[in-house]
Amino acid sequence: MRSHRIASIPADGIGPEVISAGLEVLDAIASRDGGFRLAVDHYDWGSDHYRKHGVLMPADGLERLRGADAIYFGAVGAPDIPDHVTLWGLRLPICQGFDQYANVRPTRILPGVTSPLRDAGPDDLDWLIIRENSEGEYAGHGGRAHRGLPEEVATEVAIFTRVGVERIMRYAFDCARARPRRHLTVVTKSNAQRFGLVMWDEIAASVAAEYPDVTWDKELVDAMTMRMVRKPRSIDTVVATNLHADILSDLAAALAGSLGIAPTGNVDPQRRHPSMFEPIHGSAFDITGQGIANPVASFWTAALMLEHLGEREAAAGLMTAVEQVCAAGILTPDLGGTATTKEVTRAVCAAIRGANT
Ligand code: IPM
Ligand code: MG
């Protein structure tokens, strides 16, 4: 039997609630499939760990994760700790340390979910956003001088390297090629950003020449927001810089009905290191502990992880079950329903086992 080792890091806020729900449905789909098993290692890293030990994860954290086939991550962030401390203490060191340079964000309107776009249904919005995940404004390059003085300066340098841009373009064209429509939109801002983004465009054009079977177009990021709202059907696969895709993917999630359903994968396409899968939503302290967090993002995340592990059938089976449950109206309050996290989880497990929901 195939065996996959999963490192589970639920971390903060609703993270533990949705990750334990996700592990339950993973268990159900593995039992049904019968061809593989998951060995799960649990890590209690996050803000509590920081309060006790002064760090979000131990110094040898990456070493401990290295043997995993994939990382299943919840959410990090706490009201009493600055966001940049939690982010740079756990999630970014994993993404950067394992060179997970491609961030993959699929968006669809699931059956039973209402989009704020008038008349838009499941056929109108089926996107795959590829976010560059190692450079741009997130490279950590910058600094502050003359702190606290009137002449204080701060820089946040957007880094673009030929290697970094080329590899994300190639990955995006590969993803576009694997989808039925074979179309890629390259998001840019080269009208205003004359160096990094002009190089971005040039590299996009040269990589595109290697993919004659994929059609592509280019869109400025501001115009892209309008196109997403006005002409969602014109979009299929999208590639954008780290910051642009951060913003566009929140818009995408909202247009698909809720941030509570959006999954993501931080992927090392070369598979030198484990990739990390997580819901896009954050720790959501406003609803933590109430039992109403939407587990769908963490289920969809689990499906992405299964696909990455080569368990395509199980991934598809899991998504079918999620879609059945959504279509049956078993939804948490963020989607206008009244179901709890546990009820949605039970319904998805039942759908996986083939019982009526
Ligand atoms: C995301 C999030 C993060 C980001 C935050 C939590 C720093 O918004 O994954 O999209 O900006 O990358
Ligand atoms: Mg974001």
Image: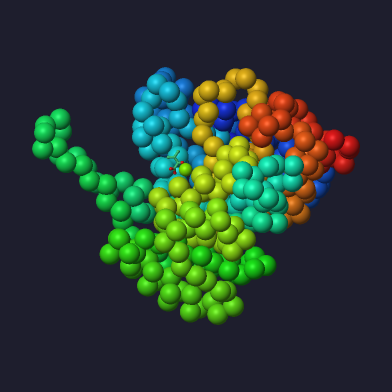
Residue at figure coordinates x 40%, y 21% from the top left: 80
Q: 176 or 222, which is in the foreground?
A: 222
Q: Is residue 145 above or below residue 222?
A: above
Which quadrant: the C terminus? top right
Give the total of numbered labels.
Answer: 0
User: In the shown orientation, is residue 277 left or right of residue 112?
Assistant: left
User: In the shown orientation, is residue 83 left or right of residue 267?
Assistant: left
For ligand 1, give the image quadrant: top left
Residue at figure coordinates x 30%, y 60% from the top left: 193
Location of residue 82 by image quarter? top left
Point out residue 151 in the picture as x, y percentages from the top left corner: 10, 37
User: In the shown orientation, is residue 129 left or right of residue 34?
Assistant: left
Q: Is residue 229 visible?
A: yes
Q: Is residue 225 above or below residue 292?
A: below
Q: 101 or 61, which is in the foreground?
A: 101
Point out residue 250 in the picture as x, y percentages from the top left corner: 51, 44
Q: Is residue 109 above or below residue 214?
A: above
Residue at figure coordinates x 65%, y 25% from the top left: 292
Q: Is residue 302 visible?
A: no
Q: Residue furthest front?
A: 118
Q: Is residue 344 above or below residue 118?
A: above
Q: How is the image coloured?
A: rainbow
Residue at figure coordinates x 52%, y 30% from the top left: 283
Point out residue 306 in the picture as x, y percentages from the top left corner: 67, 49
Location of residue 18 by image quarter? top right
